[in-house]
Amino acid sequence: MNIDINCDLGEGTDLHSCDRDAQIMPFISRCNIACGGHAGTPEIMSRSIENALQNSLKIGAHPSYPDRKNFGRKSLAISKKKLLDSLCEQIGQLENIAQELGAKLDHIKLHGALYNDAESNIELAKSIIRLFNEVYPSLKIVGLANGAMQFAASEKSKSIIREGFMDRQYLNKSQLAPRSLTNAIITETEKCLEQAVCLAKGLQFKDYHGGKLQFFVDTICLHSDNPQAPVIAKQLKQHLKANGVSIAR
């Protein structure tokens, strides 16, 4: 059995952060590279793509609200046109750098507050999917399993990669527990690894309220902002293998 593992990368402030990101790459199969909205510079994008190519990873764009000040973690009250124009600018910048390096983008995954807003607002999700369908028809979309982006994509026959989170609590099968809730983030590595196995194999696991959830995902997110991310990535690969699951390459 195989499962895709994705990680948000290129979010550091200098090229040294790319070296740390590179330590994670042998244990994942897909990377989402920040493209200027919340983080990322042309130099960091370039180095991130080069490292991803060396590790044979699928490469995707990781756009956000245009808000570097808050790292894209706050919802912005901006016009839909301004938002969609910014998404095109961000993805286009990464795509141009990728082409210069002989790489091709595979997918798009929204970041932070925009990811959450799109998954909770079907009209916003539809607008974003419509844009991606028109401007980037060949790129897949990584979105929350059972969420609004998946629904909007299915309406437009847009390819969706259903995402699950190993380190986040779920309120229900289509909604993550907000970070503002106590214990919404799973900090114990063992629990993260077990939830990853359940998501990969479609097994039952507990939701935020102690109830039972069960659904399949196509990819599991490994967050890179944990200082121990390279170690956790290695442990994840080993734990999945011990449970009969390989990382898709």
Image: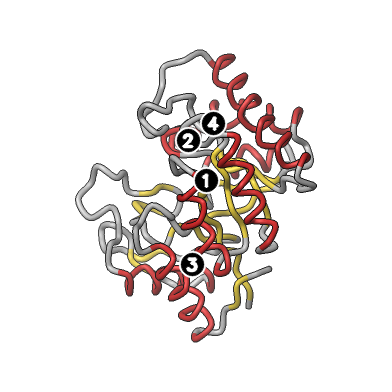
Going by the image, does 219 lie left or right of 78? Answer: right
- The three-letter code of the residue at mark 1 reads Gly
226 to the left or right of 142: left
Instruction: Indicate which disc residue 57 carries.
Output: none
Point out the tag, 4 or 1, that comes first from the N-terminus. Answer: 1
In this figure, which residue is indicated by the disc labeled 1?
10
The answer to whether marks 4 and 2 mark residues whose Cβ atoms lie closer than 8 Å is yes
Q: Earlier in the sequence, mark 3 or mark 4?
A: 4
Residue found at x 29% / y 45%: 179
Question: Considering the numbered disc 4 on the image, is that residue within a helix, a strand or a loop?
Answer: loop
Q: Where is mark 2, residue-wise? A: 39
Q: Position of residue 78 (x, y in %)?
A: 46, 15
Disc 3: which residue: 199
> Contact, CB < 8 Å: mark 1 with mark 2?
yes
Q: Residues within 10 Å of mark 4 (few under 14, many from 20)?
A: many
Q: What type is the residue that disc 3 sits on?
A: Leu
CB under 8 Å between discs 3 and 2: no
Residue 28, quarter of picture: bottom right
Kindly report the distance in space between the C-alpha atoms of the residues bearing marks 3 and 2.
Answer: 29 Å
| Disc 3 element | helix
Q: Secondary structure at mark 1?
A: loop
Read off the residue under disc 4. 36
Across and down, in percent, residue 1 comes to: 63, 78
**Label 2, residues with CA under 10 Å away: few <14, some 14-19, many ≥20:** many
Camera-side residue: 6 or 121?
6
The vertical placement of 248 against 178, above or below, is: below
Using residue 147 as the reference point, say whether residue 104 is left or right of it: right
> Mark 3 touching mark 1, by CB under 8 A?
no
Q: Are marks 3 and 4 in contact (CB under 8 Å)?
A: no
